Amino acid sequence: MIVIVEQLYNLIDSVVLTGFLYFYFGIKQKFNLAIVLLTSIGTIFLFSNLLTNASWILTLAVYGTVISAIANTLFNGKLSEKIMIVVIVNVVLALINMYVITLISRFIGIEYNILISFGSVNRFFVAISAKLIYFIFLTLLVSLKKKTIFMLSKIEYMLMILTFFISFTLIYLLRNIIVQSEKYYGIFLTALLCVLLLNIGNFFMILYISRKNLKERNTDLLQKQLEWQEENLHNLEKKYDETSKLRHDMKNHISCAIALAKQTDNMSLINYLKELSDEKLSSADNYVNVGRNVINAIINSKFELAKKSNIDVRCVIVDEMCNVSDTDIGILLGNLLDNSIEACVKNVGDSDILLKILSDAGYYCIELSNTVERDILLENPNLITSKKDTRIHGLGLKSIFSIVKKYNGIINFNQKSNRFYVYVSLSRYVS
């Protein structure tokens, strides 16, 4: 009976830890779910039995190594994060066990060392109580994972792991002193509570550092993307100017060729050259032709890209937004049009894009709309990128927000029937 109780306890422990690893990290795609779960549960269960009577140092070292190896082999995530999480969950489990055992010992009047003795029914009751608290903690940790990304350097990971380990070691040494002297349980409970609170504070420090690092990384990525977009914009303007000059020169060359062809009375060549001059060169890359080259370049290039995807394009430009820098207007229009084209490509039926650039009451107004076949704001209210690598993709919208903020502007999104709208207003009077 005693052996069955111990086996049941170890099995519960194995299932809880495996479930936590699965929900926290997720399994690697190349592995089968059932095989991963059975392998993980079986391995943890085996080592739990082998370490039943081992010293706490050996148990912590071997148990932590085994779980870290399982996590690294079968589950997703960085090794450094896996080691840190494994240390945290094992330290928390040990601290919860100590606190529950000490508390119950004081409450029911049974000595600490009796409660933890092998085969004791009381031990199983205490272990299940501690495991319930532990399960609640792991559930909260999984819930927190969905909202937070851990981003620490290797040194930061090492420091956090060391902090948890040192706090656990100190409280374990204190626990041995208390157990041997069979008194001062109140002091031990207070010290243990302080260590628990210290580790909770340490964990929130991890969250703070991670968010700070993530913000700095996003800022760096955004800056690099802006630099890349600015360079592309300059190259696009240069290419547009060269194309415009080439088209203009080609018209002159064709006019000269027509004059020469007339001298030989070659009507077929004359008609061909006229058709080439009137239709091909006049329409090439010339959807928009306003007084500002950056607007011409970005809109014509994006519209040409849209046409290749069979997307109809229309444009109404009443204001050239002279007070907005070339770089800002290029990045703003480029990202807005990229998003519209990407949305239209997903449509099964016909698609079109309509761009309006107006001015009203001290503001430049941009209205961009495109056809959609589903409710975008209902499915994705925060307009989070659907591309896999969110570290690189999804920064276009951040670039847009950054420029809108720079010009004390406003941006709104709306959907009416099968049409998605983006409204951008930028102040004329921002230097």
Image (cartoon, rainbow, N blue to C red):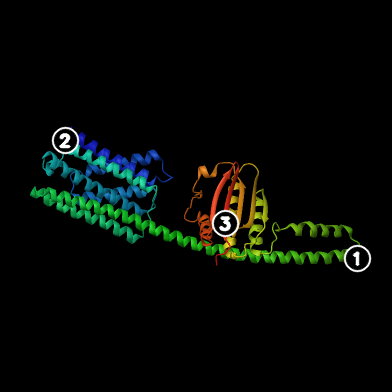
Left or right: 300, with 407 as reference point: right
From the image, tell me which residue sits under label 3. Answer: 425
Q: Which amino acid does label 3 sit on?
A: Ser
Q: Is mark 2 on a helix, strand or loop?
A: helix
Reply above or below: 151 against 145.
below
Q: Say which residue appears at 41% left-offset and 57% top-offset.
A: 214
**Residue under the image location 29 percent in, 59 percent down:** 159
The circle drawn on residue 121 is 2
The amino acid type found where label 2 is placed reads Val
Q: Are marks 1 and 2 in contact (CB under 8 Å)?
A: no
Q: Which residue lies furthest to the top in this view?
A: 1
Residue at 87% x, 64% y: name it: 261
Residue 349 locus on image (x, y percent): 64, 41
Nearer the N terminus, badge 1 or badge 3? 1
Residue name at image x 24 percent, y 36 percent: 8
Q: Is residue 214 left or right of residue 405?
A: left
Residue designated by label 1: 263
Q: In which quarter of the image is residue 12?
A: top left
Q: In which quarter of the image is the C terminus?
A: bottom right
Whole-Å distance between the Cαs marked 1 and 2? Answer: 114 Å
The answer to whether residue 119 is visible is no
Tell which tag, 1 or 3, sits nearer the viewer: 3
Q: Distance between the residues labelled 1 and 3?
A: 58 Å
In-front residue for pair 349/7: 349
- Horizontal arrangement in the rendering, residue 321 relative to residue 382 (left or right): right
Helix, strand or loop under label 1: helix
Q: What element carries label 3?
A: strand
State the image coordinates of residue 380 (x, y, percent, origin top left): 50, 45
**Mark 1, other Cα within 10 Å: few <14 / some 14–19 / many ≥20:** few
